[in-house]
Structures are given as structure tokens and as C-alpha cells.
Image (cartoon, helix red, strand yellow):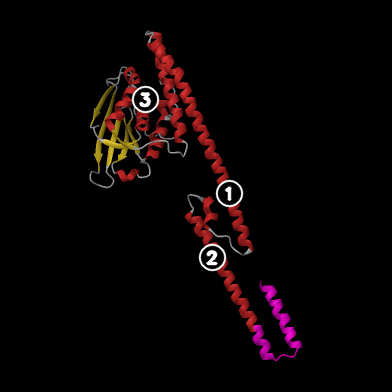
Amino acid sequence: MVIPTLLSAFLVWVVLVGVGVERDVRVLVLALMLAALVFGLVLDYGRRSDFWRSVSRAVGDAADDALAVSDLVEEPGFAEGKVCWQALDAVSREGYARATSAMREASEYREYIEAWVHEAKTPIAAARLIVDNNPGKVSSDISRELIRIDGYVEQALFYARSATVDRDYSIREVMLRDIVSDALRAHARTLIDAGMSVEREGLDVPVFADPKWVAFILGQLFENAAKYRAPEGSSRTPSLRLLASRDSVGEARELVLLRVEDNGLGIEPQDLPRVFDKGFVGKNGRLGGQSKSTGLGLFLTRRLCGKMGLGVSIESEPGSWTRVTLAFPADRSHYVDYLD
């Protein structure tokens, strides 16, 4: 823009000199042309500056969705801005296409896992019925292994569900007592085989949650309590304690806390910060006398709690006890994005 304008001004000057126009007039014409040039440069700078500022703001506003930058910025009129915007738009389109494809594949994978789980549970249920109708030492051992298989199948199902963005849970008001009873009933054989006593206290409180998801979470905690119970010969009788209480009563952040505590092996201090990590088994999970751990139980516990808007924490004293606390926000408005 600058060079063509200067060349034009030079040619106009030459022409004006050639036709004998007075010097003052020539200077005035040249001044007007230069003023127009400066005005144009200022306008052009403003347009360019506005565009780059809008790009900068869009990048900040779209921090959680960088692919949306081109949607937040209008295509400019100057060449380099057009190139930049078109590049952003192309990246955005490609990114959205890949994200859509990934979401579709994840959804198809979840549907496959759910179908597989349904098919796998049928022969498992049939096998359990057979062994139940043929009592004996061998049948009892087989039944125990079938229960383990069924637990792993359930883990696969909830792992697939937790890995997708689809909301396939249903938050509603339910009595905590009912959820705990269902979970204990489902894992009764494991707890009985482990010789664990169960103590319940204060469970007659309503909470907002998906009862099936919470029952699964509790099942993972029960299985861990049974697996890592106090060793045989210990002076402690294996026990499981479930205690519910309210915290911050009357405040906006009021909670219903469910503490699930056992008196088993406990968790080593160096392992405690990592117990929610996927695949982490820790020292106790590697003990030769214990059945091999998948390292998924607590990982799924945290992930499913996060999806439902619940809190989860863990404390432990090595060789003494482990306590997992589930925090259910008591304020219904907390679940505005989760309720049906």
C-alpha cells in the first residue's frame, strides 16, 4: 500500500510540474495524498490490530476448547489475516472431525462391551446355578471363582462406561441404607468367606446418587477389605464398618459422609498418594499370598464419583486400618447438571 501510493504521488508531482501548476498547489496536492496515505495506514493498522487482539482473546476464552478459536473470530480482510484465519479454521474442522470420530468409536466400544457383558453374564449365571444345585467342596470352589469372574466382568462394564462422555447414569434421591444393603447382599459370599463382621451405623439418610453406580463403588471397597483383611492368626477379627454422618450442617457445602472402614493390612504411606491411579496395586497388591490385583477398583471409584459429582478420599494406618470416605453434597442444587 505504501509504495504504490508514493509512486502515485511522484507521478502526480511530475505531471503537475509538466503542466505548469504552481508550486503551492503541487505541495497541497502532495500533502493531501500523503495525509490520505497516513489515514489509510492508521485504518489498516486498526483493522489488523483488532484482528490479532480478537485472536488473542479467543485463545484465552477457548482455553478448554482450542478448536473453537476460529468460531470466535471473524475472517479479516487483509491477506496475512486471511491466511491465519483459514489455517485456524482448517485445524478446527480437522480437530472436530477427529473428535467426532473418537467419540463415535468410544460409544461403539462401550456398546460392544455392554453387549459382551450381557452375553458373558448368561453362562456365568447358568454355571452358578449348576454349582448351587450340586453342593460340595469342588462346587464351592468353582462358585467362588465364578464370583470373581463376575466381578471382573462388572469392572469391564463400568470401565467402559466411565471412559465415555455419555451420561448413562441417573441421579435421584435414595436412602443410603438401601444402597448399602444391595451392595452387601451382592458381595455377601466374599465377606462371609473372609470371615468379616459388618457394622452399620447412621445409614438412614437420603442422598442424591445413582444407586447402581454407588453400589458398584461400595462393592469395590468391600472386595478390597476382604482381600487385604488381617492375616490368619492375627488377634483382630476381620471387620467392616460403614458409618454415615453429616458435615457442615446448615451450610451451603453441607455433606453426607459415608465412611467405609476395615481393620486389615492398611496401606503403606508411600503408596497412599497413588492408590487412585489406574493399574496401581501397591505393596499389598503384590504380596504373594494375595490374589493378583487389577489396580482398577479404586481408580474406577474415583472416576465414577467424579462423574456423579461426589467426593472421595482415603486414609490408612499400615497394619491397622483403611478408611475410604464418600462425600455426597446435601444441597440438591449441586446436582443441577446431573439430575434427570
The amino acid type of the residue labelled 2 equals Asp
Question: Residue 46: in sight, yes or no?
Answer: yes
Residue at the image point whose x is 30% and y is 43% from the top: 332
The label shown at residue 50 is 2
Q: Main secondary structure of the magenta part?
A: helix
Report x, y in % for residue 71.
Answer: 53, 55
Q: Earlier in the sequence, mark 1 or mark 2?
A: 2
Q: CA distance from mark 2 to mark 3?
A: 60 Å
Rate crowding at label 1 as few (under 14), some (14 to 19) or many (20 or more) other CA atoms within 10 Å: some
Residue numbers of the magenta segment? 1-30
Q: Residue at position x 57%, y 44% from top?
A: 97
Judged from the image, the secondary structure of the residue bearing numbered disc 3 is: helix
User: In the figure, 183 relative to 331: above or below?
Assistant: above
Question: Is residue 263 among what the camera can see?
Answer: no
Which residue type carries mark 1? Arg
What's under tag 3, amino acid-wise? Answer: Glu
In this rendered view, identify the residue nearer to me: 291 or 10.
10
Residue 73 spot, x, y in % from top left: 54, 58
Front label number (3 vs 1): 1
- Residue at horizontal 72 percent and vertical 82 percent from the top: 12
Residue labelled with disc 3: 223
Q: Which residue is mark 1?
A: 93
| Mark in front: 2 vs 3 | 2
**Does the magenta segment cover residue 9?**
yes
Q: Which mark is residue 262?
A: none
